[in-house]
């Protein structure tokens, strides 16, 4: 009886391990010096976008003013995919979970959006000095829900920032 159980379970366990390993290989592992990481600013950003963003392995913080020391938004950040286009721009598909999110000003001041799940399409210019992104709120993460292009005319879901001198 024990031998039969072992003969039945061993292939199932082996199959499970193969599937697990295949899925793990598909996941992007970020480098310590990703082009995305660092401090980014835009003094002219709209009221719904950060004037300063600090991105680091695993997360980010967004500030209403460049001089602020307390973020109005922060969250986790997971790079799902990365590629370089023919012009040398670096593209990312990113999953965010907002862990702190209070609209700092404007008509929605005080609105709490903690817990939102966001999927972003981001581009870092080939010079490494300009970062643009667009985003969509999702009920659950789904690879088919990423934005397909970055549209600068979409003022609600578009942002542009410039690498700060450090």
Image: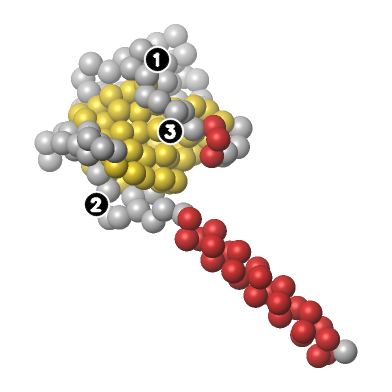
Position of the N terminus by quadrant: bottom right
Tell which circle, 2 or 1, labels the residue nearer the N-terminal end: 2
Quadrant position of residue 104: top left
Q: Nearer the viewer, residue 123 or 112?
A: 123
Q: Whole-percent x and y of residue 137? A: 52, 28
SS class, disc 1: loop
- Left or right of 93? Residue 165 is left
Residue 154 is tagged as: 1
Residue picked out by circle 2: 33
**Colour setup of the view:** secondary structure
Q: Earlier in the sequence, mark 3 or mark 1?
A: 3
Does the rendering let one see residue 48?
no
Residue 26 seen in the figure: yes
Depicted 10 relative to depicted 68: above or below: below
Residue 71 quadrant:
top left
Is 158 situated above or below 119? above
Quadrant of the rendering where the C terminus is positioned:
top left
Report crowding for label 2: few under 14, some 14 to 19, many 20 or more residues within 10 A (C-alpha).
few
The tag earlier along the polypeptide, 2 or 3, is 2
Mark 1: few/some/many CA within 10 Å (<14, 14-19, 20+): few
Q: Nearer the viewer, residue 162 or 24?
A: 24
What secondary structure is marked by label 3?
A: strand
Separation (CA) of disc 2 from disc 3: 20 Å
- Residue indicated by mark 3: 120
Q: CA distance from mark 2 to mark 1?
A: 30 Å
CB under 8 Å between callouts 2 and 3?
Answer: no
Q: Position of residue 115 (x, y in %)?
A: 54, 35
Place residue 19 in its image quadrant: bottom right
- Which residue is pictured at 46% across the width and 19% down the height? 110
């Amino acid at each position: 009886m024990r031998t039969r159980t072992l003969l039945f379970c061993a292939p199932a366990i082996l199959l499970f391990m193969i599937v697990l390993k295949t899925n793990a290989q598909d996941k992007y592992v970020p480098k310590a010096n990703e082009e995305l990481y660092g401090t980014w600013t835009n003094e002219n950003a709209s009221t719904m976008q950060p004037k300063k963003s600090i991105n680091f392995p695993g997360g980010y913080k967004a500030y209403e003013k460049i001089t602020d020391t307390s973020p109005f938004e922060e969250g986790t950040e997971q790079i799902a995919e990365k590629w370089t286009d023919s012009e040398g721009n670096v593209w990312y598909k990113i999953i965010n979970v907002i862990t702190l999110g209070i609209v700092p000003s404007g008509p929605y001041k005080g609105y709490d959006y903690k817990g939102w799940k966001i999927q972003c399409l981001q581009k870092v210019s080939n010079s490494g000095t300009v970062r643009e992104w667009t985003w969509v709120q999702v009920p659950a993460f789904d690879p088919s829900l990423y934005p397909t292009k970055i549209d600068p005319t979409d003022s609600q879901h578009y942002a542009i920032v410039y690498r700060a001198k450090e």
